[in-house]
Image (spheres, rainbow, N blue to C red):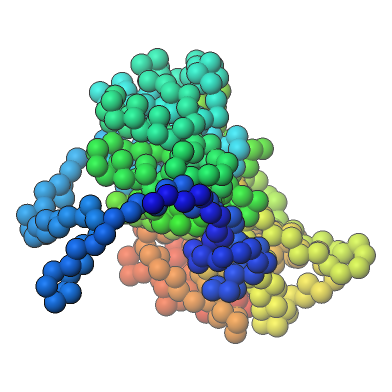
């Protein structure tokens, strides 16, 4: 029995189906989240067979699968494929797992295709055949990009195709070790109506690519465009289908990029790799702390350094603050790389607990290098940078500030203080300010750890 395709609407936030479009999802309450989806053109037919007593019902064409014991499953120590691009291998958890599917997202022009072409060239040179399927660029365009790369991508197989069936059939015949699809929003399947890039096409194509990866052992890399909100375009379930999700962060105006793992079934989450955009491609940065602190001014007020933990890696980041007299109207509160609500909270704490009033001042805060400050360990650096700007007194260039600031003005300890201090010592820092209870028993050589209880105590030590 066959039927004409029929459109339904699916919520991109929770995945709930709706018979017709509405401005608000009834299941999760999200607004403007329903996207049209075309159902399959054909519906499989067939009866069902039942065992006596109705205990088991098998759909037509189904079969009983084998259920091995976990102890009998091989491959728990499967060797990964390394590309030789250290930062990329590090973010993946040590290399590429055969049969995995990796989604790489980012803004246009940030370097997704460039990085994957470099990876394809490295893998091809290492004996792992690679098929690069592009639905956005012709073979000539890819060749022009490859000519300026440091790696030689001449042996990489190219396929300029948007039809998913053709891509999978070609991959099955070539049997590559790695398949790159650039991008998931440009491919489509004939089994669904609708243009490439809609919710149904994106999810169905991703599911089939995932099935191909698991059945063939080919590692599949998929490029995904991002929306205005910074998320992968298409259904949220796309990120649940794949094994690993990597996001490119950074501005086009700066020459470095941050590759962050937001999901990884084979490694740590929130690991980052730092790259520098050069004429011959993306160059890995072995010491990110040195990169982010390289252009720091030694004598400017409003600058403080903190130590963050990104995945398993400690990194030193500079925080810049500027408090200036408001010109007119309501004072501005502008934060780049930092939560605006957290900034408002710290301003209130500084006013109430340390006597610093920002009611008539514009406040501008910037996390240098395009990084985003998510964890509360940077609160202390933000607070002391704001105070430094108000007092117009520069902080010591070899001091680092690590700690969470509470509503009572108290300084709270943060996790992995020893690793943060060790990175600070390696970068030449000589003084570290942190919560009194967080001072470790063994401090790295050359570093003096000073414990403080409240934000007022810190200001007294630093500015008096």
Residue 131's quadrant in the figure? top left
Q: 452 and 151: which one is in front?
A: 151
> Residue shown at 46%/47% (left/top)?
41
Q: Position of residue 194 (x, y in %)?
A: 56, 44
Between residues 118 and 450, which one lies in front from this camera angle?
Answer: 118
Locate residue 435, reporting x and y percent: 48, 74
- Quarter that holds the C terminus: bottom right
Measured from the top left, where is residue 438 in percent x and y? 41, 73
Q: Tell me residue 459's x, y (percent).
A: 63, 72
Q: Residue furthest right?
A: 328
- Residue 361 showing in the rendered view: yes
Tell me where residue 196 sits by quadrant: top right
Q: Residue at x 61, y 64 (%)?
A: 20
Dividing the picture into quarters, in which one does residue 126 lie? top left
- Residue 69 in the image: above or below residue 352: above
In the picture provided, is 104 more to the left or to the right than 345? Answer: left
| Picture residue at 17% right of the left edge, 43% below the top | 78
Q: Is residue 230 above or below residue 455?
A: above
Q: Nearer the viewer, residue 423 or 141?
A: 141
What residue lies at 17% left-to-right and 55% top-to-bottom? 63
């Amino acid at each position: 029995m066959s039927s004409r395709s029929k459109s339904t609407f699916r919520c991109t936030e929770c995945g709930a189906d709706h018979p017709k479009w509405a401005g608000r999802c009834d299941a999760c309450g999200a607004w403007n989240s329903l996207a049209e989806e075309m159902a399959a053109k054909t519906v499989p037919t067939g009866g069902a067979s039942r065992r006596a007593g109705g205990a088991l019902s098998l759909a037509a064409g189904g079969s009983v699968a084998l259920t091995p014991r976990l102890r009998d499953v091989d491959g728990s120590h499967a060797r990964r494929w390394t590309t030789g691009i250290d930062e990329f291998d590090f973010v993946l958890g040590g290399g590429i797992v055969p049969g995995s599917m990796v989604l790489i997202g980012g803004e246009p022009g940030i370097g997704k295709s460039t990085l994957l072409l470099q990876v394809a060239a490295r893998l091809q040179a290492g004996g792992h055949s690679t098929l690069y399927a592009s639905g956005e660029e012709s073979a000539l365009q890819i060749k022009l990009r490859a000519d300026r790369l440091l790696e030689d991508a001449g042996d990489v197989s190219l396929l300029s195709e948007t039809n998913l069936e053709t891509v999978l059939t070609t991959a099955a015949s070539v049997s590559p070790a790695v398949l790159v699809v650039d991008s998931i929003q440009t491919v489509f399947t004939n089994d669904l109506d609708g243009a490439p890039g809609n919710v149904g096409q994106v999810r169905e194509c991703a599911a089939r690519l995932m099935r191909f990866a698991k059945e063939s052992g080919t590692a599949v890399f998929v490029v995904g465009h991002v929306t205005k909100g910074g998320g992968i375009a298409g259904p949220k379930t796309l990120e649940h289908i794949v094994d690993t999700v990597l996001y490119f962060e950074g501005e086009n105006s700066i020459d470095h990029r941050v590759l962050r793992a937001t999901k990884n079934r084979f490694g740590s989450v929130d690991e980052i790799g730092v790259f520098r955009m050069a004429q011959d491609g993306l160059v890995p940065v072995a010491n990110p702390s040195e990169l982010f602190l390289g252009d720091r001014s030694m004598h400017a007020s409003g600058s403080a350094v903190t130590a963050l933990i990104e995945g398993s890696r400690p990194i030193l980041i500079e925080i810049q603050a500027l408090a200036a007299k408001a010109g007119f109207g309501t004072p501005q509160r502008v934060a780049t790389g930092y939560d605006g609500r957290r900034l408002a909270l710290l301003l209130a704490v500084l006013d109430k607990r340390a006597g610093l009033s920002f009611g008539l001042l514009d406040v501008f805060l910037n996390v240098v290098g395009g990084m985003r400050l998510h964890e509360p360990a940077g609160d202390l650096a933000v607070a002391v940078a704001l105070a430094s700007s108000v007092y117009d007194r520069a902080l010591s260039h070899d001091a680092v500030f690590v700690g969470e600031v509470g509503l009572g003005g108290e300084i709270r300890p943060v996790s992995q203080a020893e690793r943060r201090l060790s990175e600070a010592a390696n970068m030449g820092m000589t003084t570290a300010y942190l919560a009194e209870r967080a001072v470790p028993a063994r401090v790295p050589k050359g570093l003096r750890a000073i414990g403080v209880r409240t934000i007022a105590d810190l200001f007294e030590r630093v500015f008096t």
